[in-house]
Image (cartoon, helix red, strand yellow):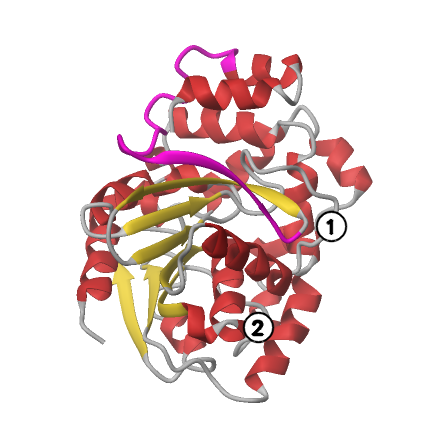
């Protein structure tokens, strides 16, 4: 993606949004995906997703989480594009995707991704996900099993799976219940302060989530409606848990699953949780990393994903 093209798109949303993204020189520098990636605005399931597509070969879909956008996947996209068609959407209402007032249940967002795959002529794909993206990825793999070849989930459990109710009791996760109009007003204009809390508390080494990355994502989350979409992702968790438990009552995932955790975050717990939901789980712990694996340990994380995807079925 070229920054000028993204600016042109933002101009459609108004001069205020453009001013926000261009207020700091070089704000988007370092967040372009590799040369050859194309930008698509794909209408799907009642919304429009901002999607980058590049490379050639078997398809892989990369799904970001909260506090990031699809821009987080730059190093992995560059590596995988050598041998794969790499599809990088911004999730519903997030990043440069169209703003949305509803539809943040993860089963519904899985349908968003199916629509993207259909628009691109992709029948099956590997799925690599992080954080909220894990929840969309799990919903995609469980409801559209014939569309997902392998699944990689990084450092966040899907709602309703395994010890979900115990996980919810962790005081660090108070933000799961933080949202609504008053909370949006409290955070408005203070997006960087709010997001710094996640980047600091969930990192093994906060400095590895760079100042440039913080400025970049804070600007994107300060766009009109962006924080509403972010809060709505969490507000859907109760229904997500019900939906996931309904799937698990019928069985488990059977495709290969790589469960990655940072050693200072979920670690091996990711694999332990996913064994409640899948029969073929490979554990992977990334050393010297908290939750933000792509920012804290990109080389090790890319290598783990590449090794897993390269294994024959």
Residue 257 on image: x %, y %: 34, 72
Q: Is residue 131 visible in the rendered structure shown here?
A: no
Residue 159 on image: x %, y %: 58, 68
Q: Quadrant of residue 73?
A: top left
For disc 1, the marked residue is 102
For disc 2, the marked residue is 164
Q: Is residue 87 visible in the rendered structure shown here?
A: yes
Residue 220 on image: x %, y %: 55, 29
- Residue placed at 45% from the left, 21% from the top? 5
Front residue of 117/208: it is: 117
Q: Is residue 189 above or below residue 107?
A: above
Classify residue 71 as left or right of residue 235: left
The quarter of the rendered structure image containing the C terminus is: bottom left
- Helix, strand or loop for the magenta stretch, by majority: loop
Q: Is residue 33 above or below residue 116?
A: above
Task: Please name which of the two marks, 1 or 2, marks the residue nearer to the observer.
Answer: 1
**Mark 2 or mark 1, which is nearer the start of the sequence?**
1
Q: Is residue 32 above or below residue 97?
A: above
Classify residue 217 as left or right of residue 10: left
Front residue of 155/203: it is: 155
The residues colored magenta run 22-45
- Going by the picture, which residue comes out furthest to the right? 182
- Kind of element beneath mark 2: helix
The quarter of the rendered structure image containing the N terminus is: top left
Q: Quadrant of residue 26?
A: top left
- Residue placed at 27% from the left, 66% from the top? 284
- Residue placed at 28% from the left, 63% from the top? 285
- Residue placed at 69% from the left, 32% from the top? 187
**Label 1, label 2: how far apart the Cα atoms are:** 24 Å
User: How packed is label 2: few (under 14 Cα within 10 Å), some, or many (20 or more)?
Assistant: some
| 251 is within the stretch colored magenta | no
């Amino acid at each position: 993606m070229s920054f000028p093209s993204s600016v042109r798109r933002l101009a459609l949303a108004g001069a205020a949004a453009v001013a926000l993204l261009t207020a700091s020189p070089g704000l988007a520098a370092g967040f372009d995906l590799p040369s050859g990636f194309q930008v698509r605005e794909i209408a799907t399931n009642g919304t429009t997703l901002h999607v980058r597509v590049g490379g050639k070969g078997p398809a892989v879909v990369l799904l970001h989480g909260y506090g990031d956008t699809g821009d987080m996947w730059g190093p992995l996209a560059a590596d995988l594009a050598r041998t794969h068609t790499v599809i990088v959407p911004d999730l519903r209402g997030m990043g440069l995707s169209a703003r949305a007032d509803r539809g943040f249940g993860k089963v519904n967002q899985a349908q968003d991704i199916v629509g993207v795959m259909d628009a691109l002529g992709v029948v099956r794909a590997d799925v690599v996900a992080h954080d909220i993206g894990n929840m969309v990825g799990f919903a995609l793999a469980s409801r559209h099993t014939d569309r997902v070849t392998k699944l990689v989930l990084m450092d966040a459990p899907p709602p309703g799976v395994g010890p979900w109710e115990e996980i919810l009791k962790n005081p660090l996760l108070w933000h799961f219940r933080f949202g609504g109009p008053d909370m949006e007003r409290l955070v408005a204009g203070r997006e960087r302060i709010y997001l710094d809390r996640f980047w600091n508390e969930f990192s093994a080494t906060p400095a590895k989530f760079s100042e440039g990355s913080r400025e970049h994502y804070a600007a994107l989350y300060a766009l009109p409606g962006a924080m509403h979409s972010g809060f709505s992702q969490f507000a859907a968790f109760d229904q997500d848990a019900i939906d996931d438990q309904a799937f698990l009552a019928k069985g488990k995932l059977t495709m290969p699953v790589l469960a990655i955790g940072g050693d200072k975050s979920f670690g091996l717990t990711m694999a332990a949780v996913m064994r409640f939901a899948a029969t073929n789980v490979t554990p992977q712990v990334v050393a010297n990393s908290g939750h933000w694996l792509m920012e804290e340990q990109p080389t090790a994380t890319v290598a783990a994903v590449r090794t897993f995807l390269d294994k024959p079925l």
